[in-house]
Amino acid sequence: TDATNRKAVVEVKDYEDDLSIPACEVTQGNGAPTAAQKRRGNKSVPSKEVEVNLKTYAEGVLPLQNVDEDGKLIQVGDMVDLSFLHEAAILYNLKVRHSQSIPYTRTGDIVIAVNPYQWLTELYSEETRLHYTDKLVHNAPKDSDPKSAVEPHVYETSALAYRGLAADGQDQSILVSGESGAGKTETVKILMSHLASVQQGAQSGGGDGDSGGGISPIVERVLDSNPLLEAFGNAKTVRNDNSSRFGKFIQLQFDTEDPTMAAYSGKSLPAAVLAGSKCETYLLEKSRVVSHEEEERTYHIFYQLLAAPEEEKVGIWTGLAQTDNESFAYVGSSDTNVIEGKTDTQRFQHTLDALKIVGVTGDTLRDLMRSICIVLQLGNLVFEPDPDNEENAIIVSTDELTALAELMGVEEDVVKKSLTERTVNARNEVFKVPLNVPKAQDSRDAFAKEIYSQAFEWLVKTINDATCAENNYDGALTSEFGHIGLLDIFGFESFTVNRFEQLCINYANEKLQQKFTLDIFRSVQQEYEFEGIRLGEVMYTDNADVLKLIEGRMGLISVLNEECLRPKGNDVAFVTKVYAMNKDSEALLKGRFFQDYEFEVKHYAGNVTYDANNFVTKNMDNLPSDLTECKKKSTNIIVKTDVTRKVGNQSRPKTPTEVTKRGPALRKKSSSLKSDTVWTKFKSQLGELMQNISKTRTRYIRCVKPNKMKQPRIMQHLSTVEQLRCAGVVAAVTISRSAFPNRLEHEQVLDRFMCLEKSFVRESKPGDGSDEVFDDVHRLLSIILKSVEKEKDGRPVQGFVCGNTRAYFRAGSLELLENRRLHAFGDLAKDMQRIVRGFIARSKYLRLKEKAIVVQSEYRRNTARKQYLQMREAAIRIQCWIRMTFAQAMLVELRRNDRATKIQTYWRMIVAKFAFKQKRNAAVKIQACARGARQRPLYRQALAEAIEEAKLENQLKTLQRKLEEAEARRIEAEKRAEEGATKTVVVYKNAENGENVAENKSAAAPVSTPISSSQLSEQQQTLMDESGKMLEYLRKEVFKLRSQNSQLRTDFELLKENNQRLMDANASAGASFAALNQHAKQLSKTNAKLKADSTRYRQQCHSLQMSQVELKEELKMKQGTYIAEVHSRLQYQKTMSHIVDAIQERCEDHRLVEDILTMSDECESDYMSGPTGVDLTPKKRPSKTADQSFTSRFKSLFT
C-alpha cells in the first residue's frame, strides 16, 4: 500500500466474461467442479495487478471477505448476519445461493428474489406452505424473531403480513419491484395464492367461516382475475415473454375478527377471512397497441383472439374468418405463439373461462371482444394524399373502412370525417380543418389507443365489481375490512434513450424509495433501540431534492403542464424552462454535449439522461372532439361509455368528453385541462397510493433478473449490481451500516480476538447470561481498541459500541483487529512450528528404526523361501515325467478303441440305411395302391355324375329351345288370329253398310234385295266358320300348353332328383375328405405327397360347394319363373272368363253362345284335370296389349 497517495496494488484474476467467474474458486463438497469451471475447462485463469485508489472506499480501507474459521467464504440466508456487508459481499452471497437453486435471500425485512428461470416444485409444495404458515402464523414464537426459524422465502413475507393483520389489526402492504423479466408478476401470484391458503387454513381451523375443503367462489374470483390482467396488460418484450406493461396495486380485503371475541372463543389468533379484492392500475403502455419492436409482440389478447377456433371468431365478428396475425397491421407477424408453455389458443380459452368467472358472458363478452376487433381494424386503414389537394388525406382502403363502420355501428361517413377532419372552435365559429396524411395516421392511432385503454379500464372496473367485498361478501364479522396490499410496480429504468414513460416510472420509484428509506431508518432505529445504542449515530441520504425537482412548484410537472397549455408549446421550450427555473437544484444536471431537448436527473439509483421529444404530446392525454363524438355514436357499450374510476375522494372520467384547440381562450380553463394531463393524473394516483401505503405496515420484495439469456444458475455481475442499486438494496445497507459498518456476535468477538491480549482472562463461560458476556466483550475491546479512540466534543469516542447481543464496530476498527489477529497468528505459528518440527524429527527416527528391522526380517524370509521353491520345482518335474509316461500308454489304448468304435458305427449305419430304404420303397408302393383303390370308385362316381350333369344340361337346353319354339309359334298364331279377326270385322261392316243402302233404295230397285240377303247370310256363315276354326285353334293351343306344362314339371322333378344326388355326392365327398384329412394328419411326418393330395381334394370340395350354391341360386330363379307362369295362367283364366261374359252379353245367336260356353268348360276341365308343368328357363310373358287386342276383336265382332 502506498500510504502517501492512498493507493493499493491488488492481484485479481482476469476472467473472459461474467459467465466464467465462479461463485467460489473451490470445488463442490463432493469434489466435483463448479459450473463456471466446467465452462472454462482446463484453461488456467491468468492474473493481473490492478492499482486501486483507496479514496473511493470507506475510511480508505479495502472491504474484507466474510470467511469462517477455516478461511472459507461463507453464504448466509439473512445478510444482516454478515460481518462485512458491502456490494461485493451481497453479490457473492446472492450468486452462491442462486447457483444452488436458492432464489430467496433476506436482508432484514427485505426479501431479495432472484429469478431462477425454472419452477422449483419443492419450494412451493403444500408442505412448504404449511411449514411457513405454522412457524410464522399459528405457532410463531413471542420472545424472539420468528424469521430466524425459517429460510428466506416470499411465503415468509405473506405469512407475516397475514399475522400482522390478524393479530395486530394493522393493515399490511407488500411492495414488489424489479425490472422487466425479474419475476414480479409471478411473485405476486405466489403471494396471493399463499395468502388464500393461509386464510383458508385459519378459517377451517376454527372460525365462523365455512370449514369446507373447497375453495370459496370469492377466493376463486380473486385468484383468477390475474390471467385477465395478463391477457389484456402483458406483452412479449426483448427482456421477458410475459412482461406486465402496467403497474397494479391489489388490495386483498379480509374480514378480521375482533381480538377480544377471539380470546373469549379460545382462539390463539383471530380469524381473518379473504372477503374480496380491489385493483388499481397505473400507466398502461398505450403506445404498444399501435407499434412494437420487430422481435416483440403487442398485448397477448390480440394473438389469443386471432388464434381462437374459427367458429368462435366468426361468432364474435365475421370479419375475423380465415384471418391470422399478418392480417392486421397493428399485430403483424410473430416468431412465437407459446408463452410460458401455453399456446395462444389455450390461453384464449383460459381467458374466456376467467371472464366467465367474473360475469363477462353473452353480449357483454361479445362487446368486449368486438372492441378489440375495432382496434385491429383501425390499424388496417390506409391514408394517402388527396389527388385534388395533397395537403388533405383520404382513406383509400374503402373495404376496411366499411367493415370498421359496421363493426362500430356508426355510419361510414361519420367515421371517415372523424379520422380525416378536425373541428376547430374560433370566435364562436366552428370550422372543419382537413388533416394531412401524418396527422390522420396519428389521429387513427390515438383513437385505437384510447379505445383499447378504455376497454382495459372497463375490464379492471368489472373485475373490481366482481371481487370487491362490498358487493360479494356476506356475513362480515366486522363493519370494516382489513387490507393487505400487493404492489406490482415497474422498477427503476435507465436505457440508452429514456423518454416520457421512463421519467414517470422513475418518479414513481423515487416516491417509493423515499418510503423505503424511511422504513429502513425505522428498522435500524428499532434494531439500535433493541441493542441499547443511541439513535444519533445513524446517518442516511434523502432523495428530497429529486422529488422537489419533479413535483415542486417550479418542477418538471408544473413546467410541462404549463407548456401543454401554451398555444405553441414544444419540447425544447420545456427543457429550457426547466434549466432556467431549477438552476440551483443539485438533482438537475446538464452535460457539455447535450442537445436542446436533453436533460439529466440525478436519481437515487444513478444519473439518467432523458430525451424530451414528444413530452408535450404524450402528456396531453386528450382525444379530439370529432373522435369523441364518433365514439359516443357507437353501438358498442364498452366503446361508447366513459369508464369512471375513483381517485382520492373524487370520481373522474378516464377520457375527456371534449377538447378544443389550444389558444388564448383556454387560459380560463387552465386548471381543468391541467388536471387532465397524464402526469397530473399519475401524480394523483401515486399520491393516493402513497397515502394508502403510509397507513400500513410495509414489507418489501426486490426481484432481480440474474442474466439476459434467461438461463438457470447463471448470474451476470454488472447487471445484477445495477439492479441491486436501483432496487435500493445497497442504499438500505448504507443506511443500516452508516455509523457501524461491521458487527459481530459477542461469542464471535471473544473467539476471534482473545488471542490479541494475553493478559485478558475470560470470566464468563459459553452459554452464560448476556450480562457476563457483555462485560467480557466490553473489557476486551476497550483494551485492544484503545489506540483508535478519538476526542469529540471533549469526550472520548471509542471505535466500537457494545449492544445487548452484538458488538458494533466503526469504520476501520474491525479491519485493524483482523490485521493484528493475523500478526498474532504469525507469532503463535512460530511456537507451533518449533514443537511440530521436534515431533516430526523423532517420529522420523522411530520410523527409520522400525523399517530397518522390517528389512532384515524380509531378507531372511526371502532366502529361506528361495531354497524351498527350488526343491519344490525339482519334485514337480519328477512327478510330471512319471505321469507323462503313464499318460502316453493310456493315450495309445484310447486311440485304438476310438478307431474301432468308429468303424463299427459306420458299418451299422450302412446296414440300417439300406434296410430303411427298402422299407420306405415298400411303404410308398403300398400307399400308392391303397390310394388308388380308394380314389378309383370316387373317380368313377364323379365321372358318372359329370356325365349325368352334362345330360341334364343338354336336356335343359333342349327344353329351353322347345319352349322358345312354342312361344314363337304362339306369337305367330296370335298374329294370324288378329289378322283374321280384322278381316272378318271389315267384311261384317261392309255387309251392314250394304243392308242400309238397300233399305234406303227399296223403292227404286226392288229386284236387288234378295241378292243382298243371300250374300249377307253367306258372309255370316263364313264368319261363324272362322270363329269355330279360331276356337278350335285356341283349344289346341291350350292342350299344347298343358302338355308342355306337364313335361316341364316332369323335368323339374328330374332336376330335383339330380340335385339330391349331387348333394349326397357332396356329403360323401365331405366325409371322404374328413377321413383323408385325418389320415393325412397321422402320416404328415412321413408322407408329404398325401398332404398335397389332401390339399387338392379340399379345392375340389370347395368347387363342389360353389357348384351347389350356384344350383341353389338357379333353383330359386326357376321357382320364381314357375310362380310367374302360374300368375299368367290365372290371368289367362280371367281373360277367358271376360271373353265368355262378353259373348253372353252381346251375341244374339244363342247356339253360338252355348257352343262357346261348352268349349270354355272343356278347356277349363282339361286344364284342371291334366298334368301341370312349367319350364324352369325364363320365358317372355304375353304382353298386355296382345290380350287387349284379342278381347277387342271379339267386342267389335258382337257389337
Image (spheres, grey):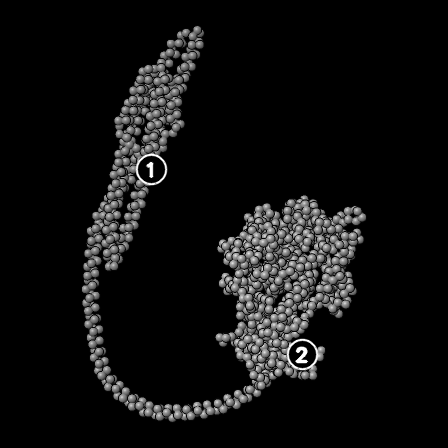
Q: Residues within 10 Å of mark 1 (few under 14, many from 20)?
A: some
Nearer to the camera, 1196 or 691: 691
The type of residue carrying mark 2 is Val
The type of residue carrying mark 1 is Met
Is residue 594 at least partly visible in the picture? Answer: no
Which residue is tagged 1? 1117
Where does residue 506 sit, x and y in percent of width and height?
68, 63
Q: Which quarter of the rendered picture does the N terminus lie within?
A: bottom right
Q: Which quarter of the rendered picture does the C terminus lie within?
A: top left
Q: Is residue 708 above or below residue 474?
A: below
Q: Is residue 402 above or below residue 564?
A: above
The residue that appears at 56% across and 51% down in the rendered structure is: 475
Where does residue 610 sit, x and y in percent of width and height?
71, 64
Q: Secondary structure at mark 2?
A: strand
Left or right side of 691 for 255 = left
The residues tagged by marks 2 and 1 sit, at their Cα atoms, a distance apart of: 132 Å
Which residue is tagged 2? 797
Where does residue 722 sit, x and y in percent of width and height?
64, 69
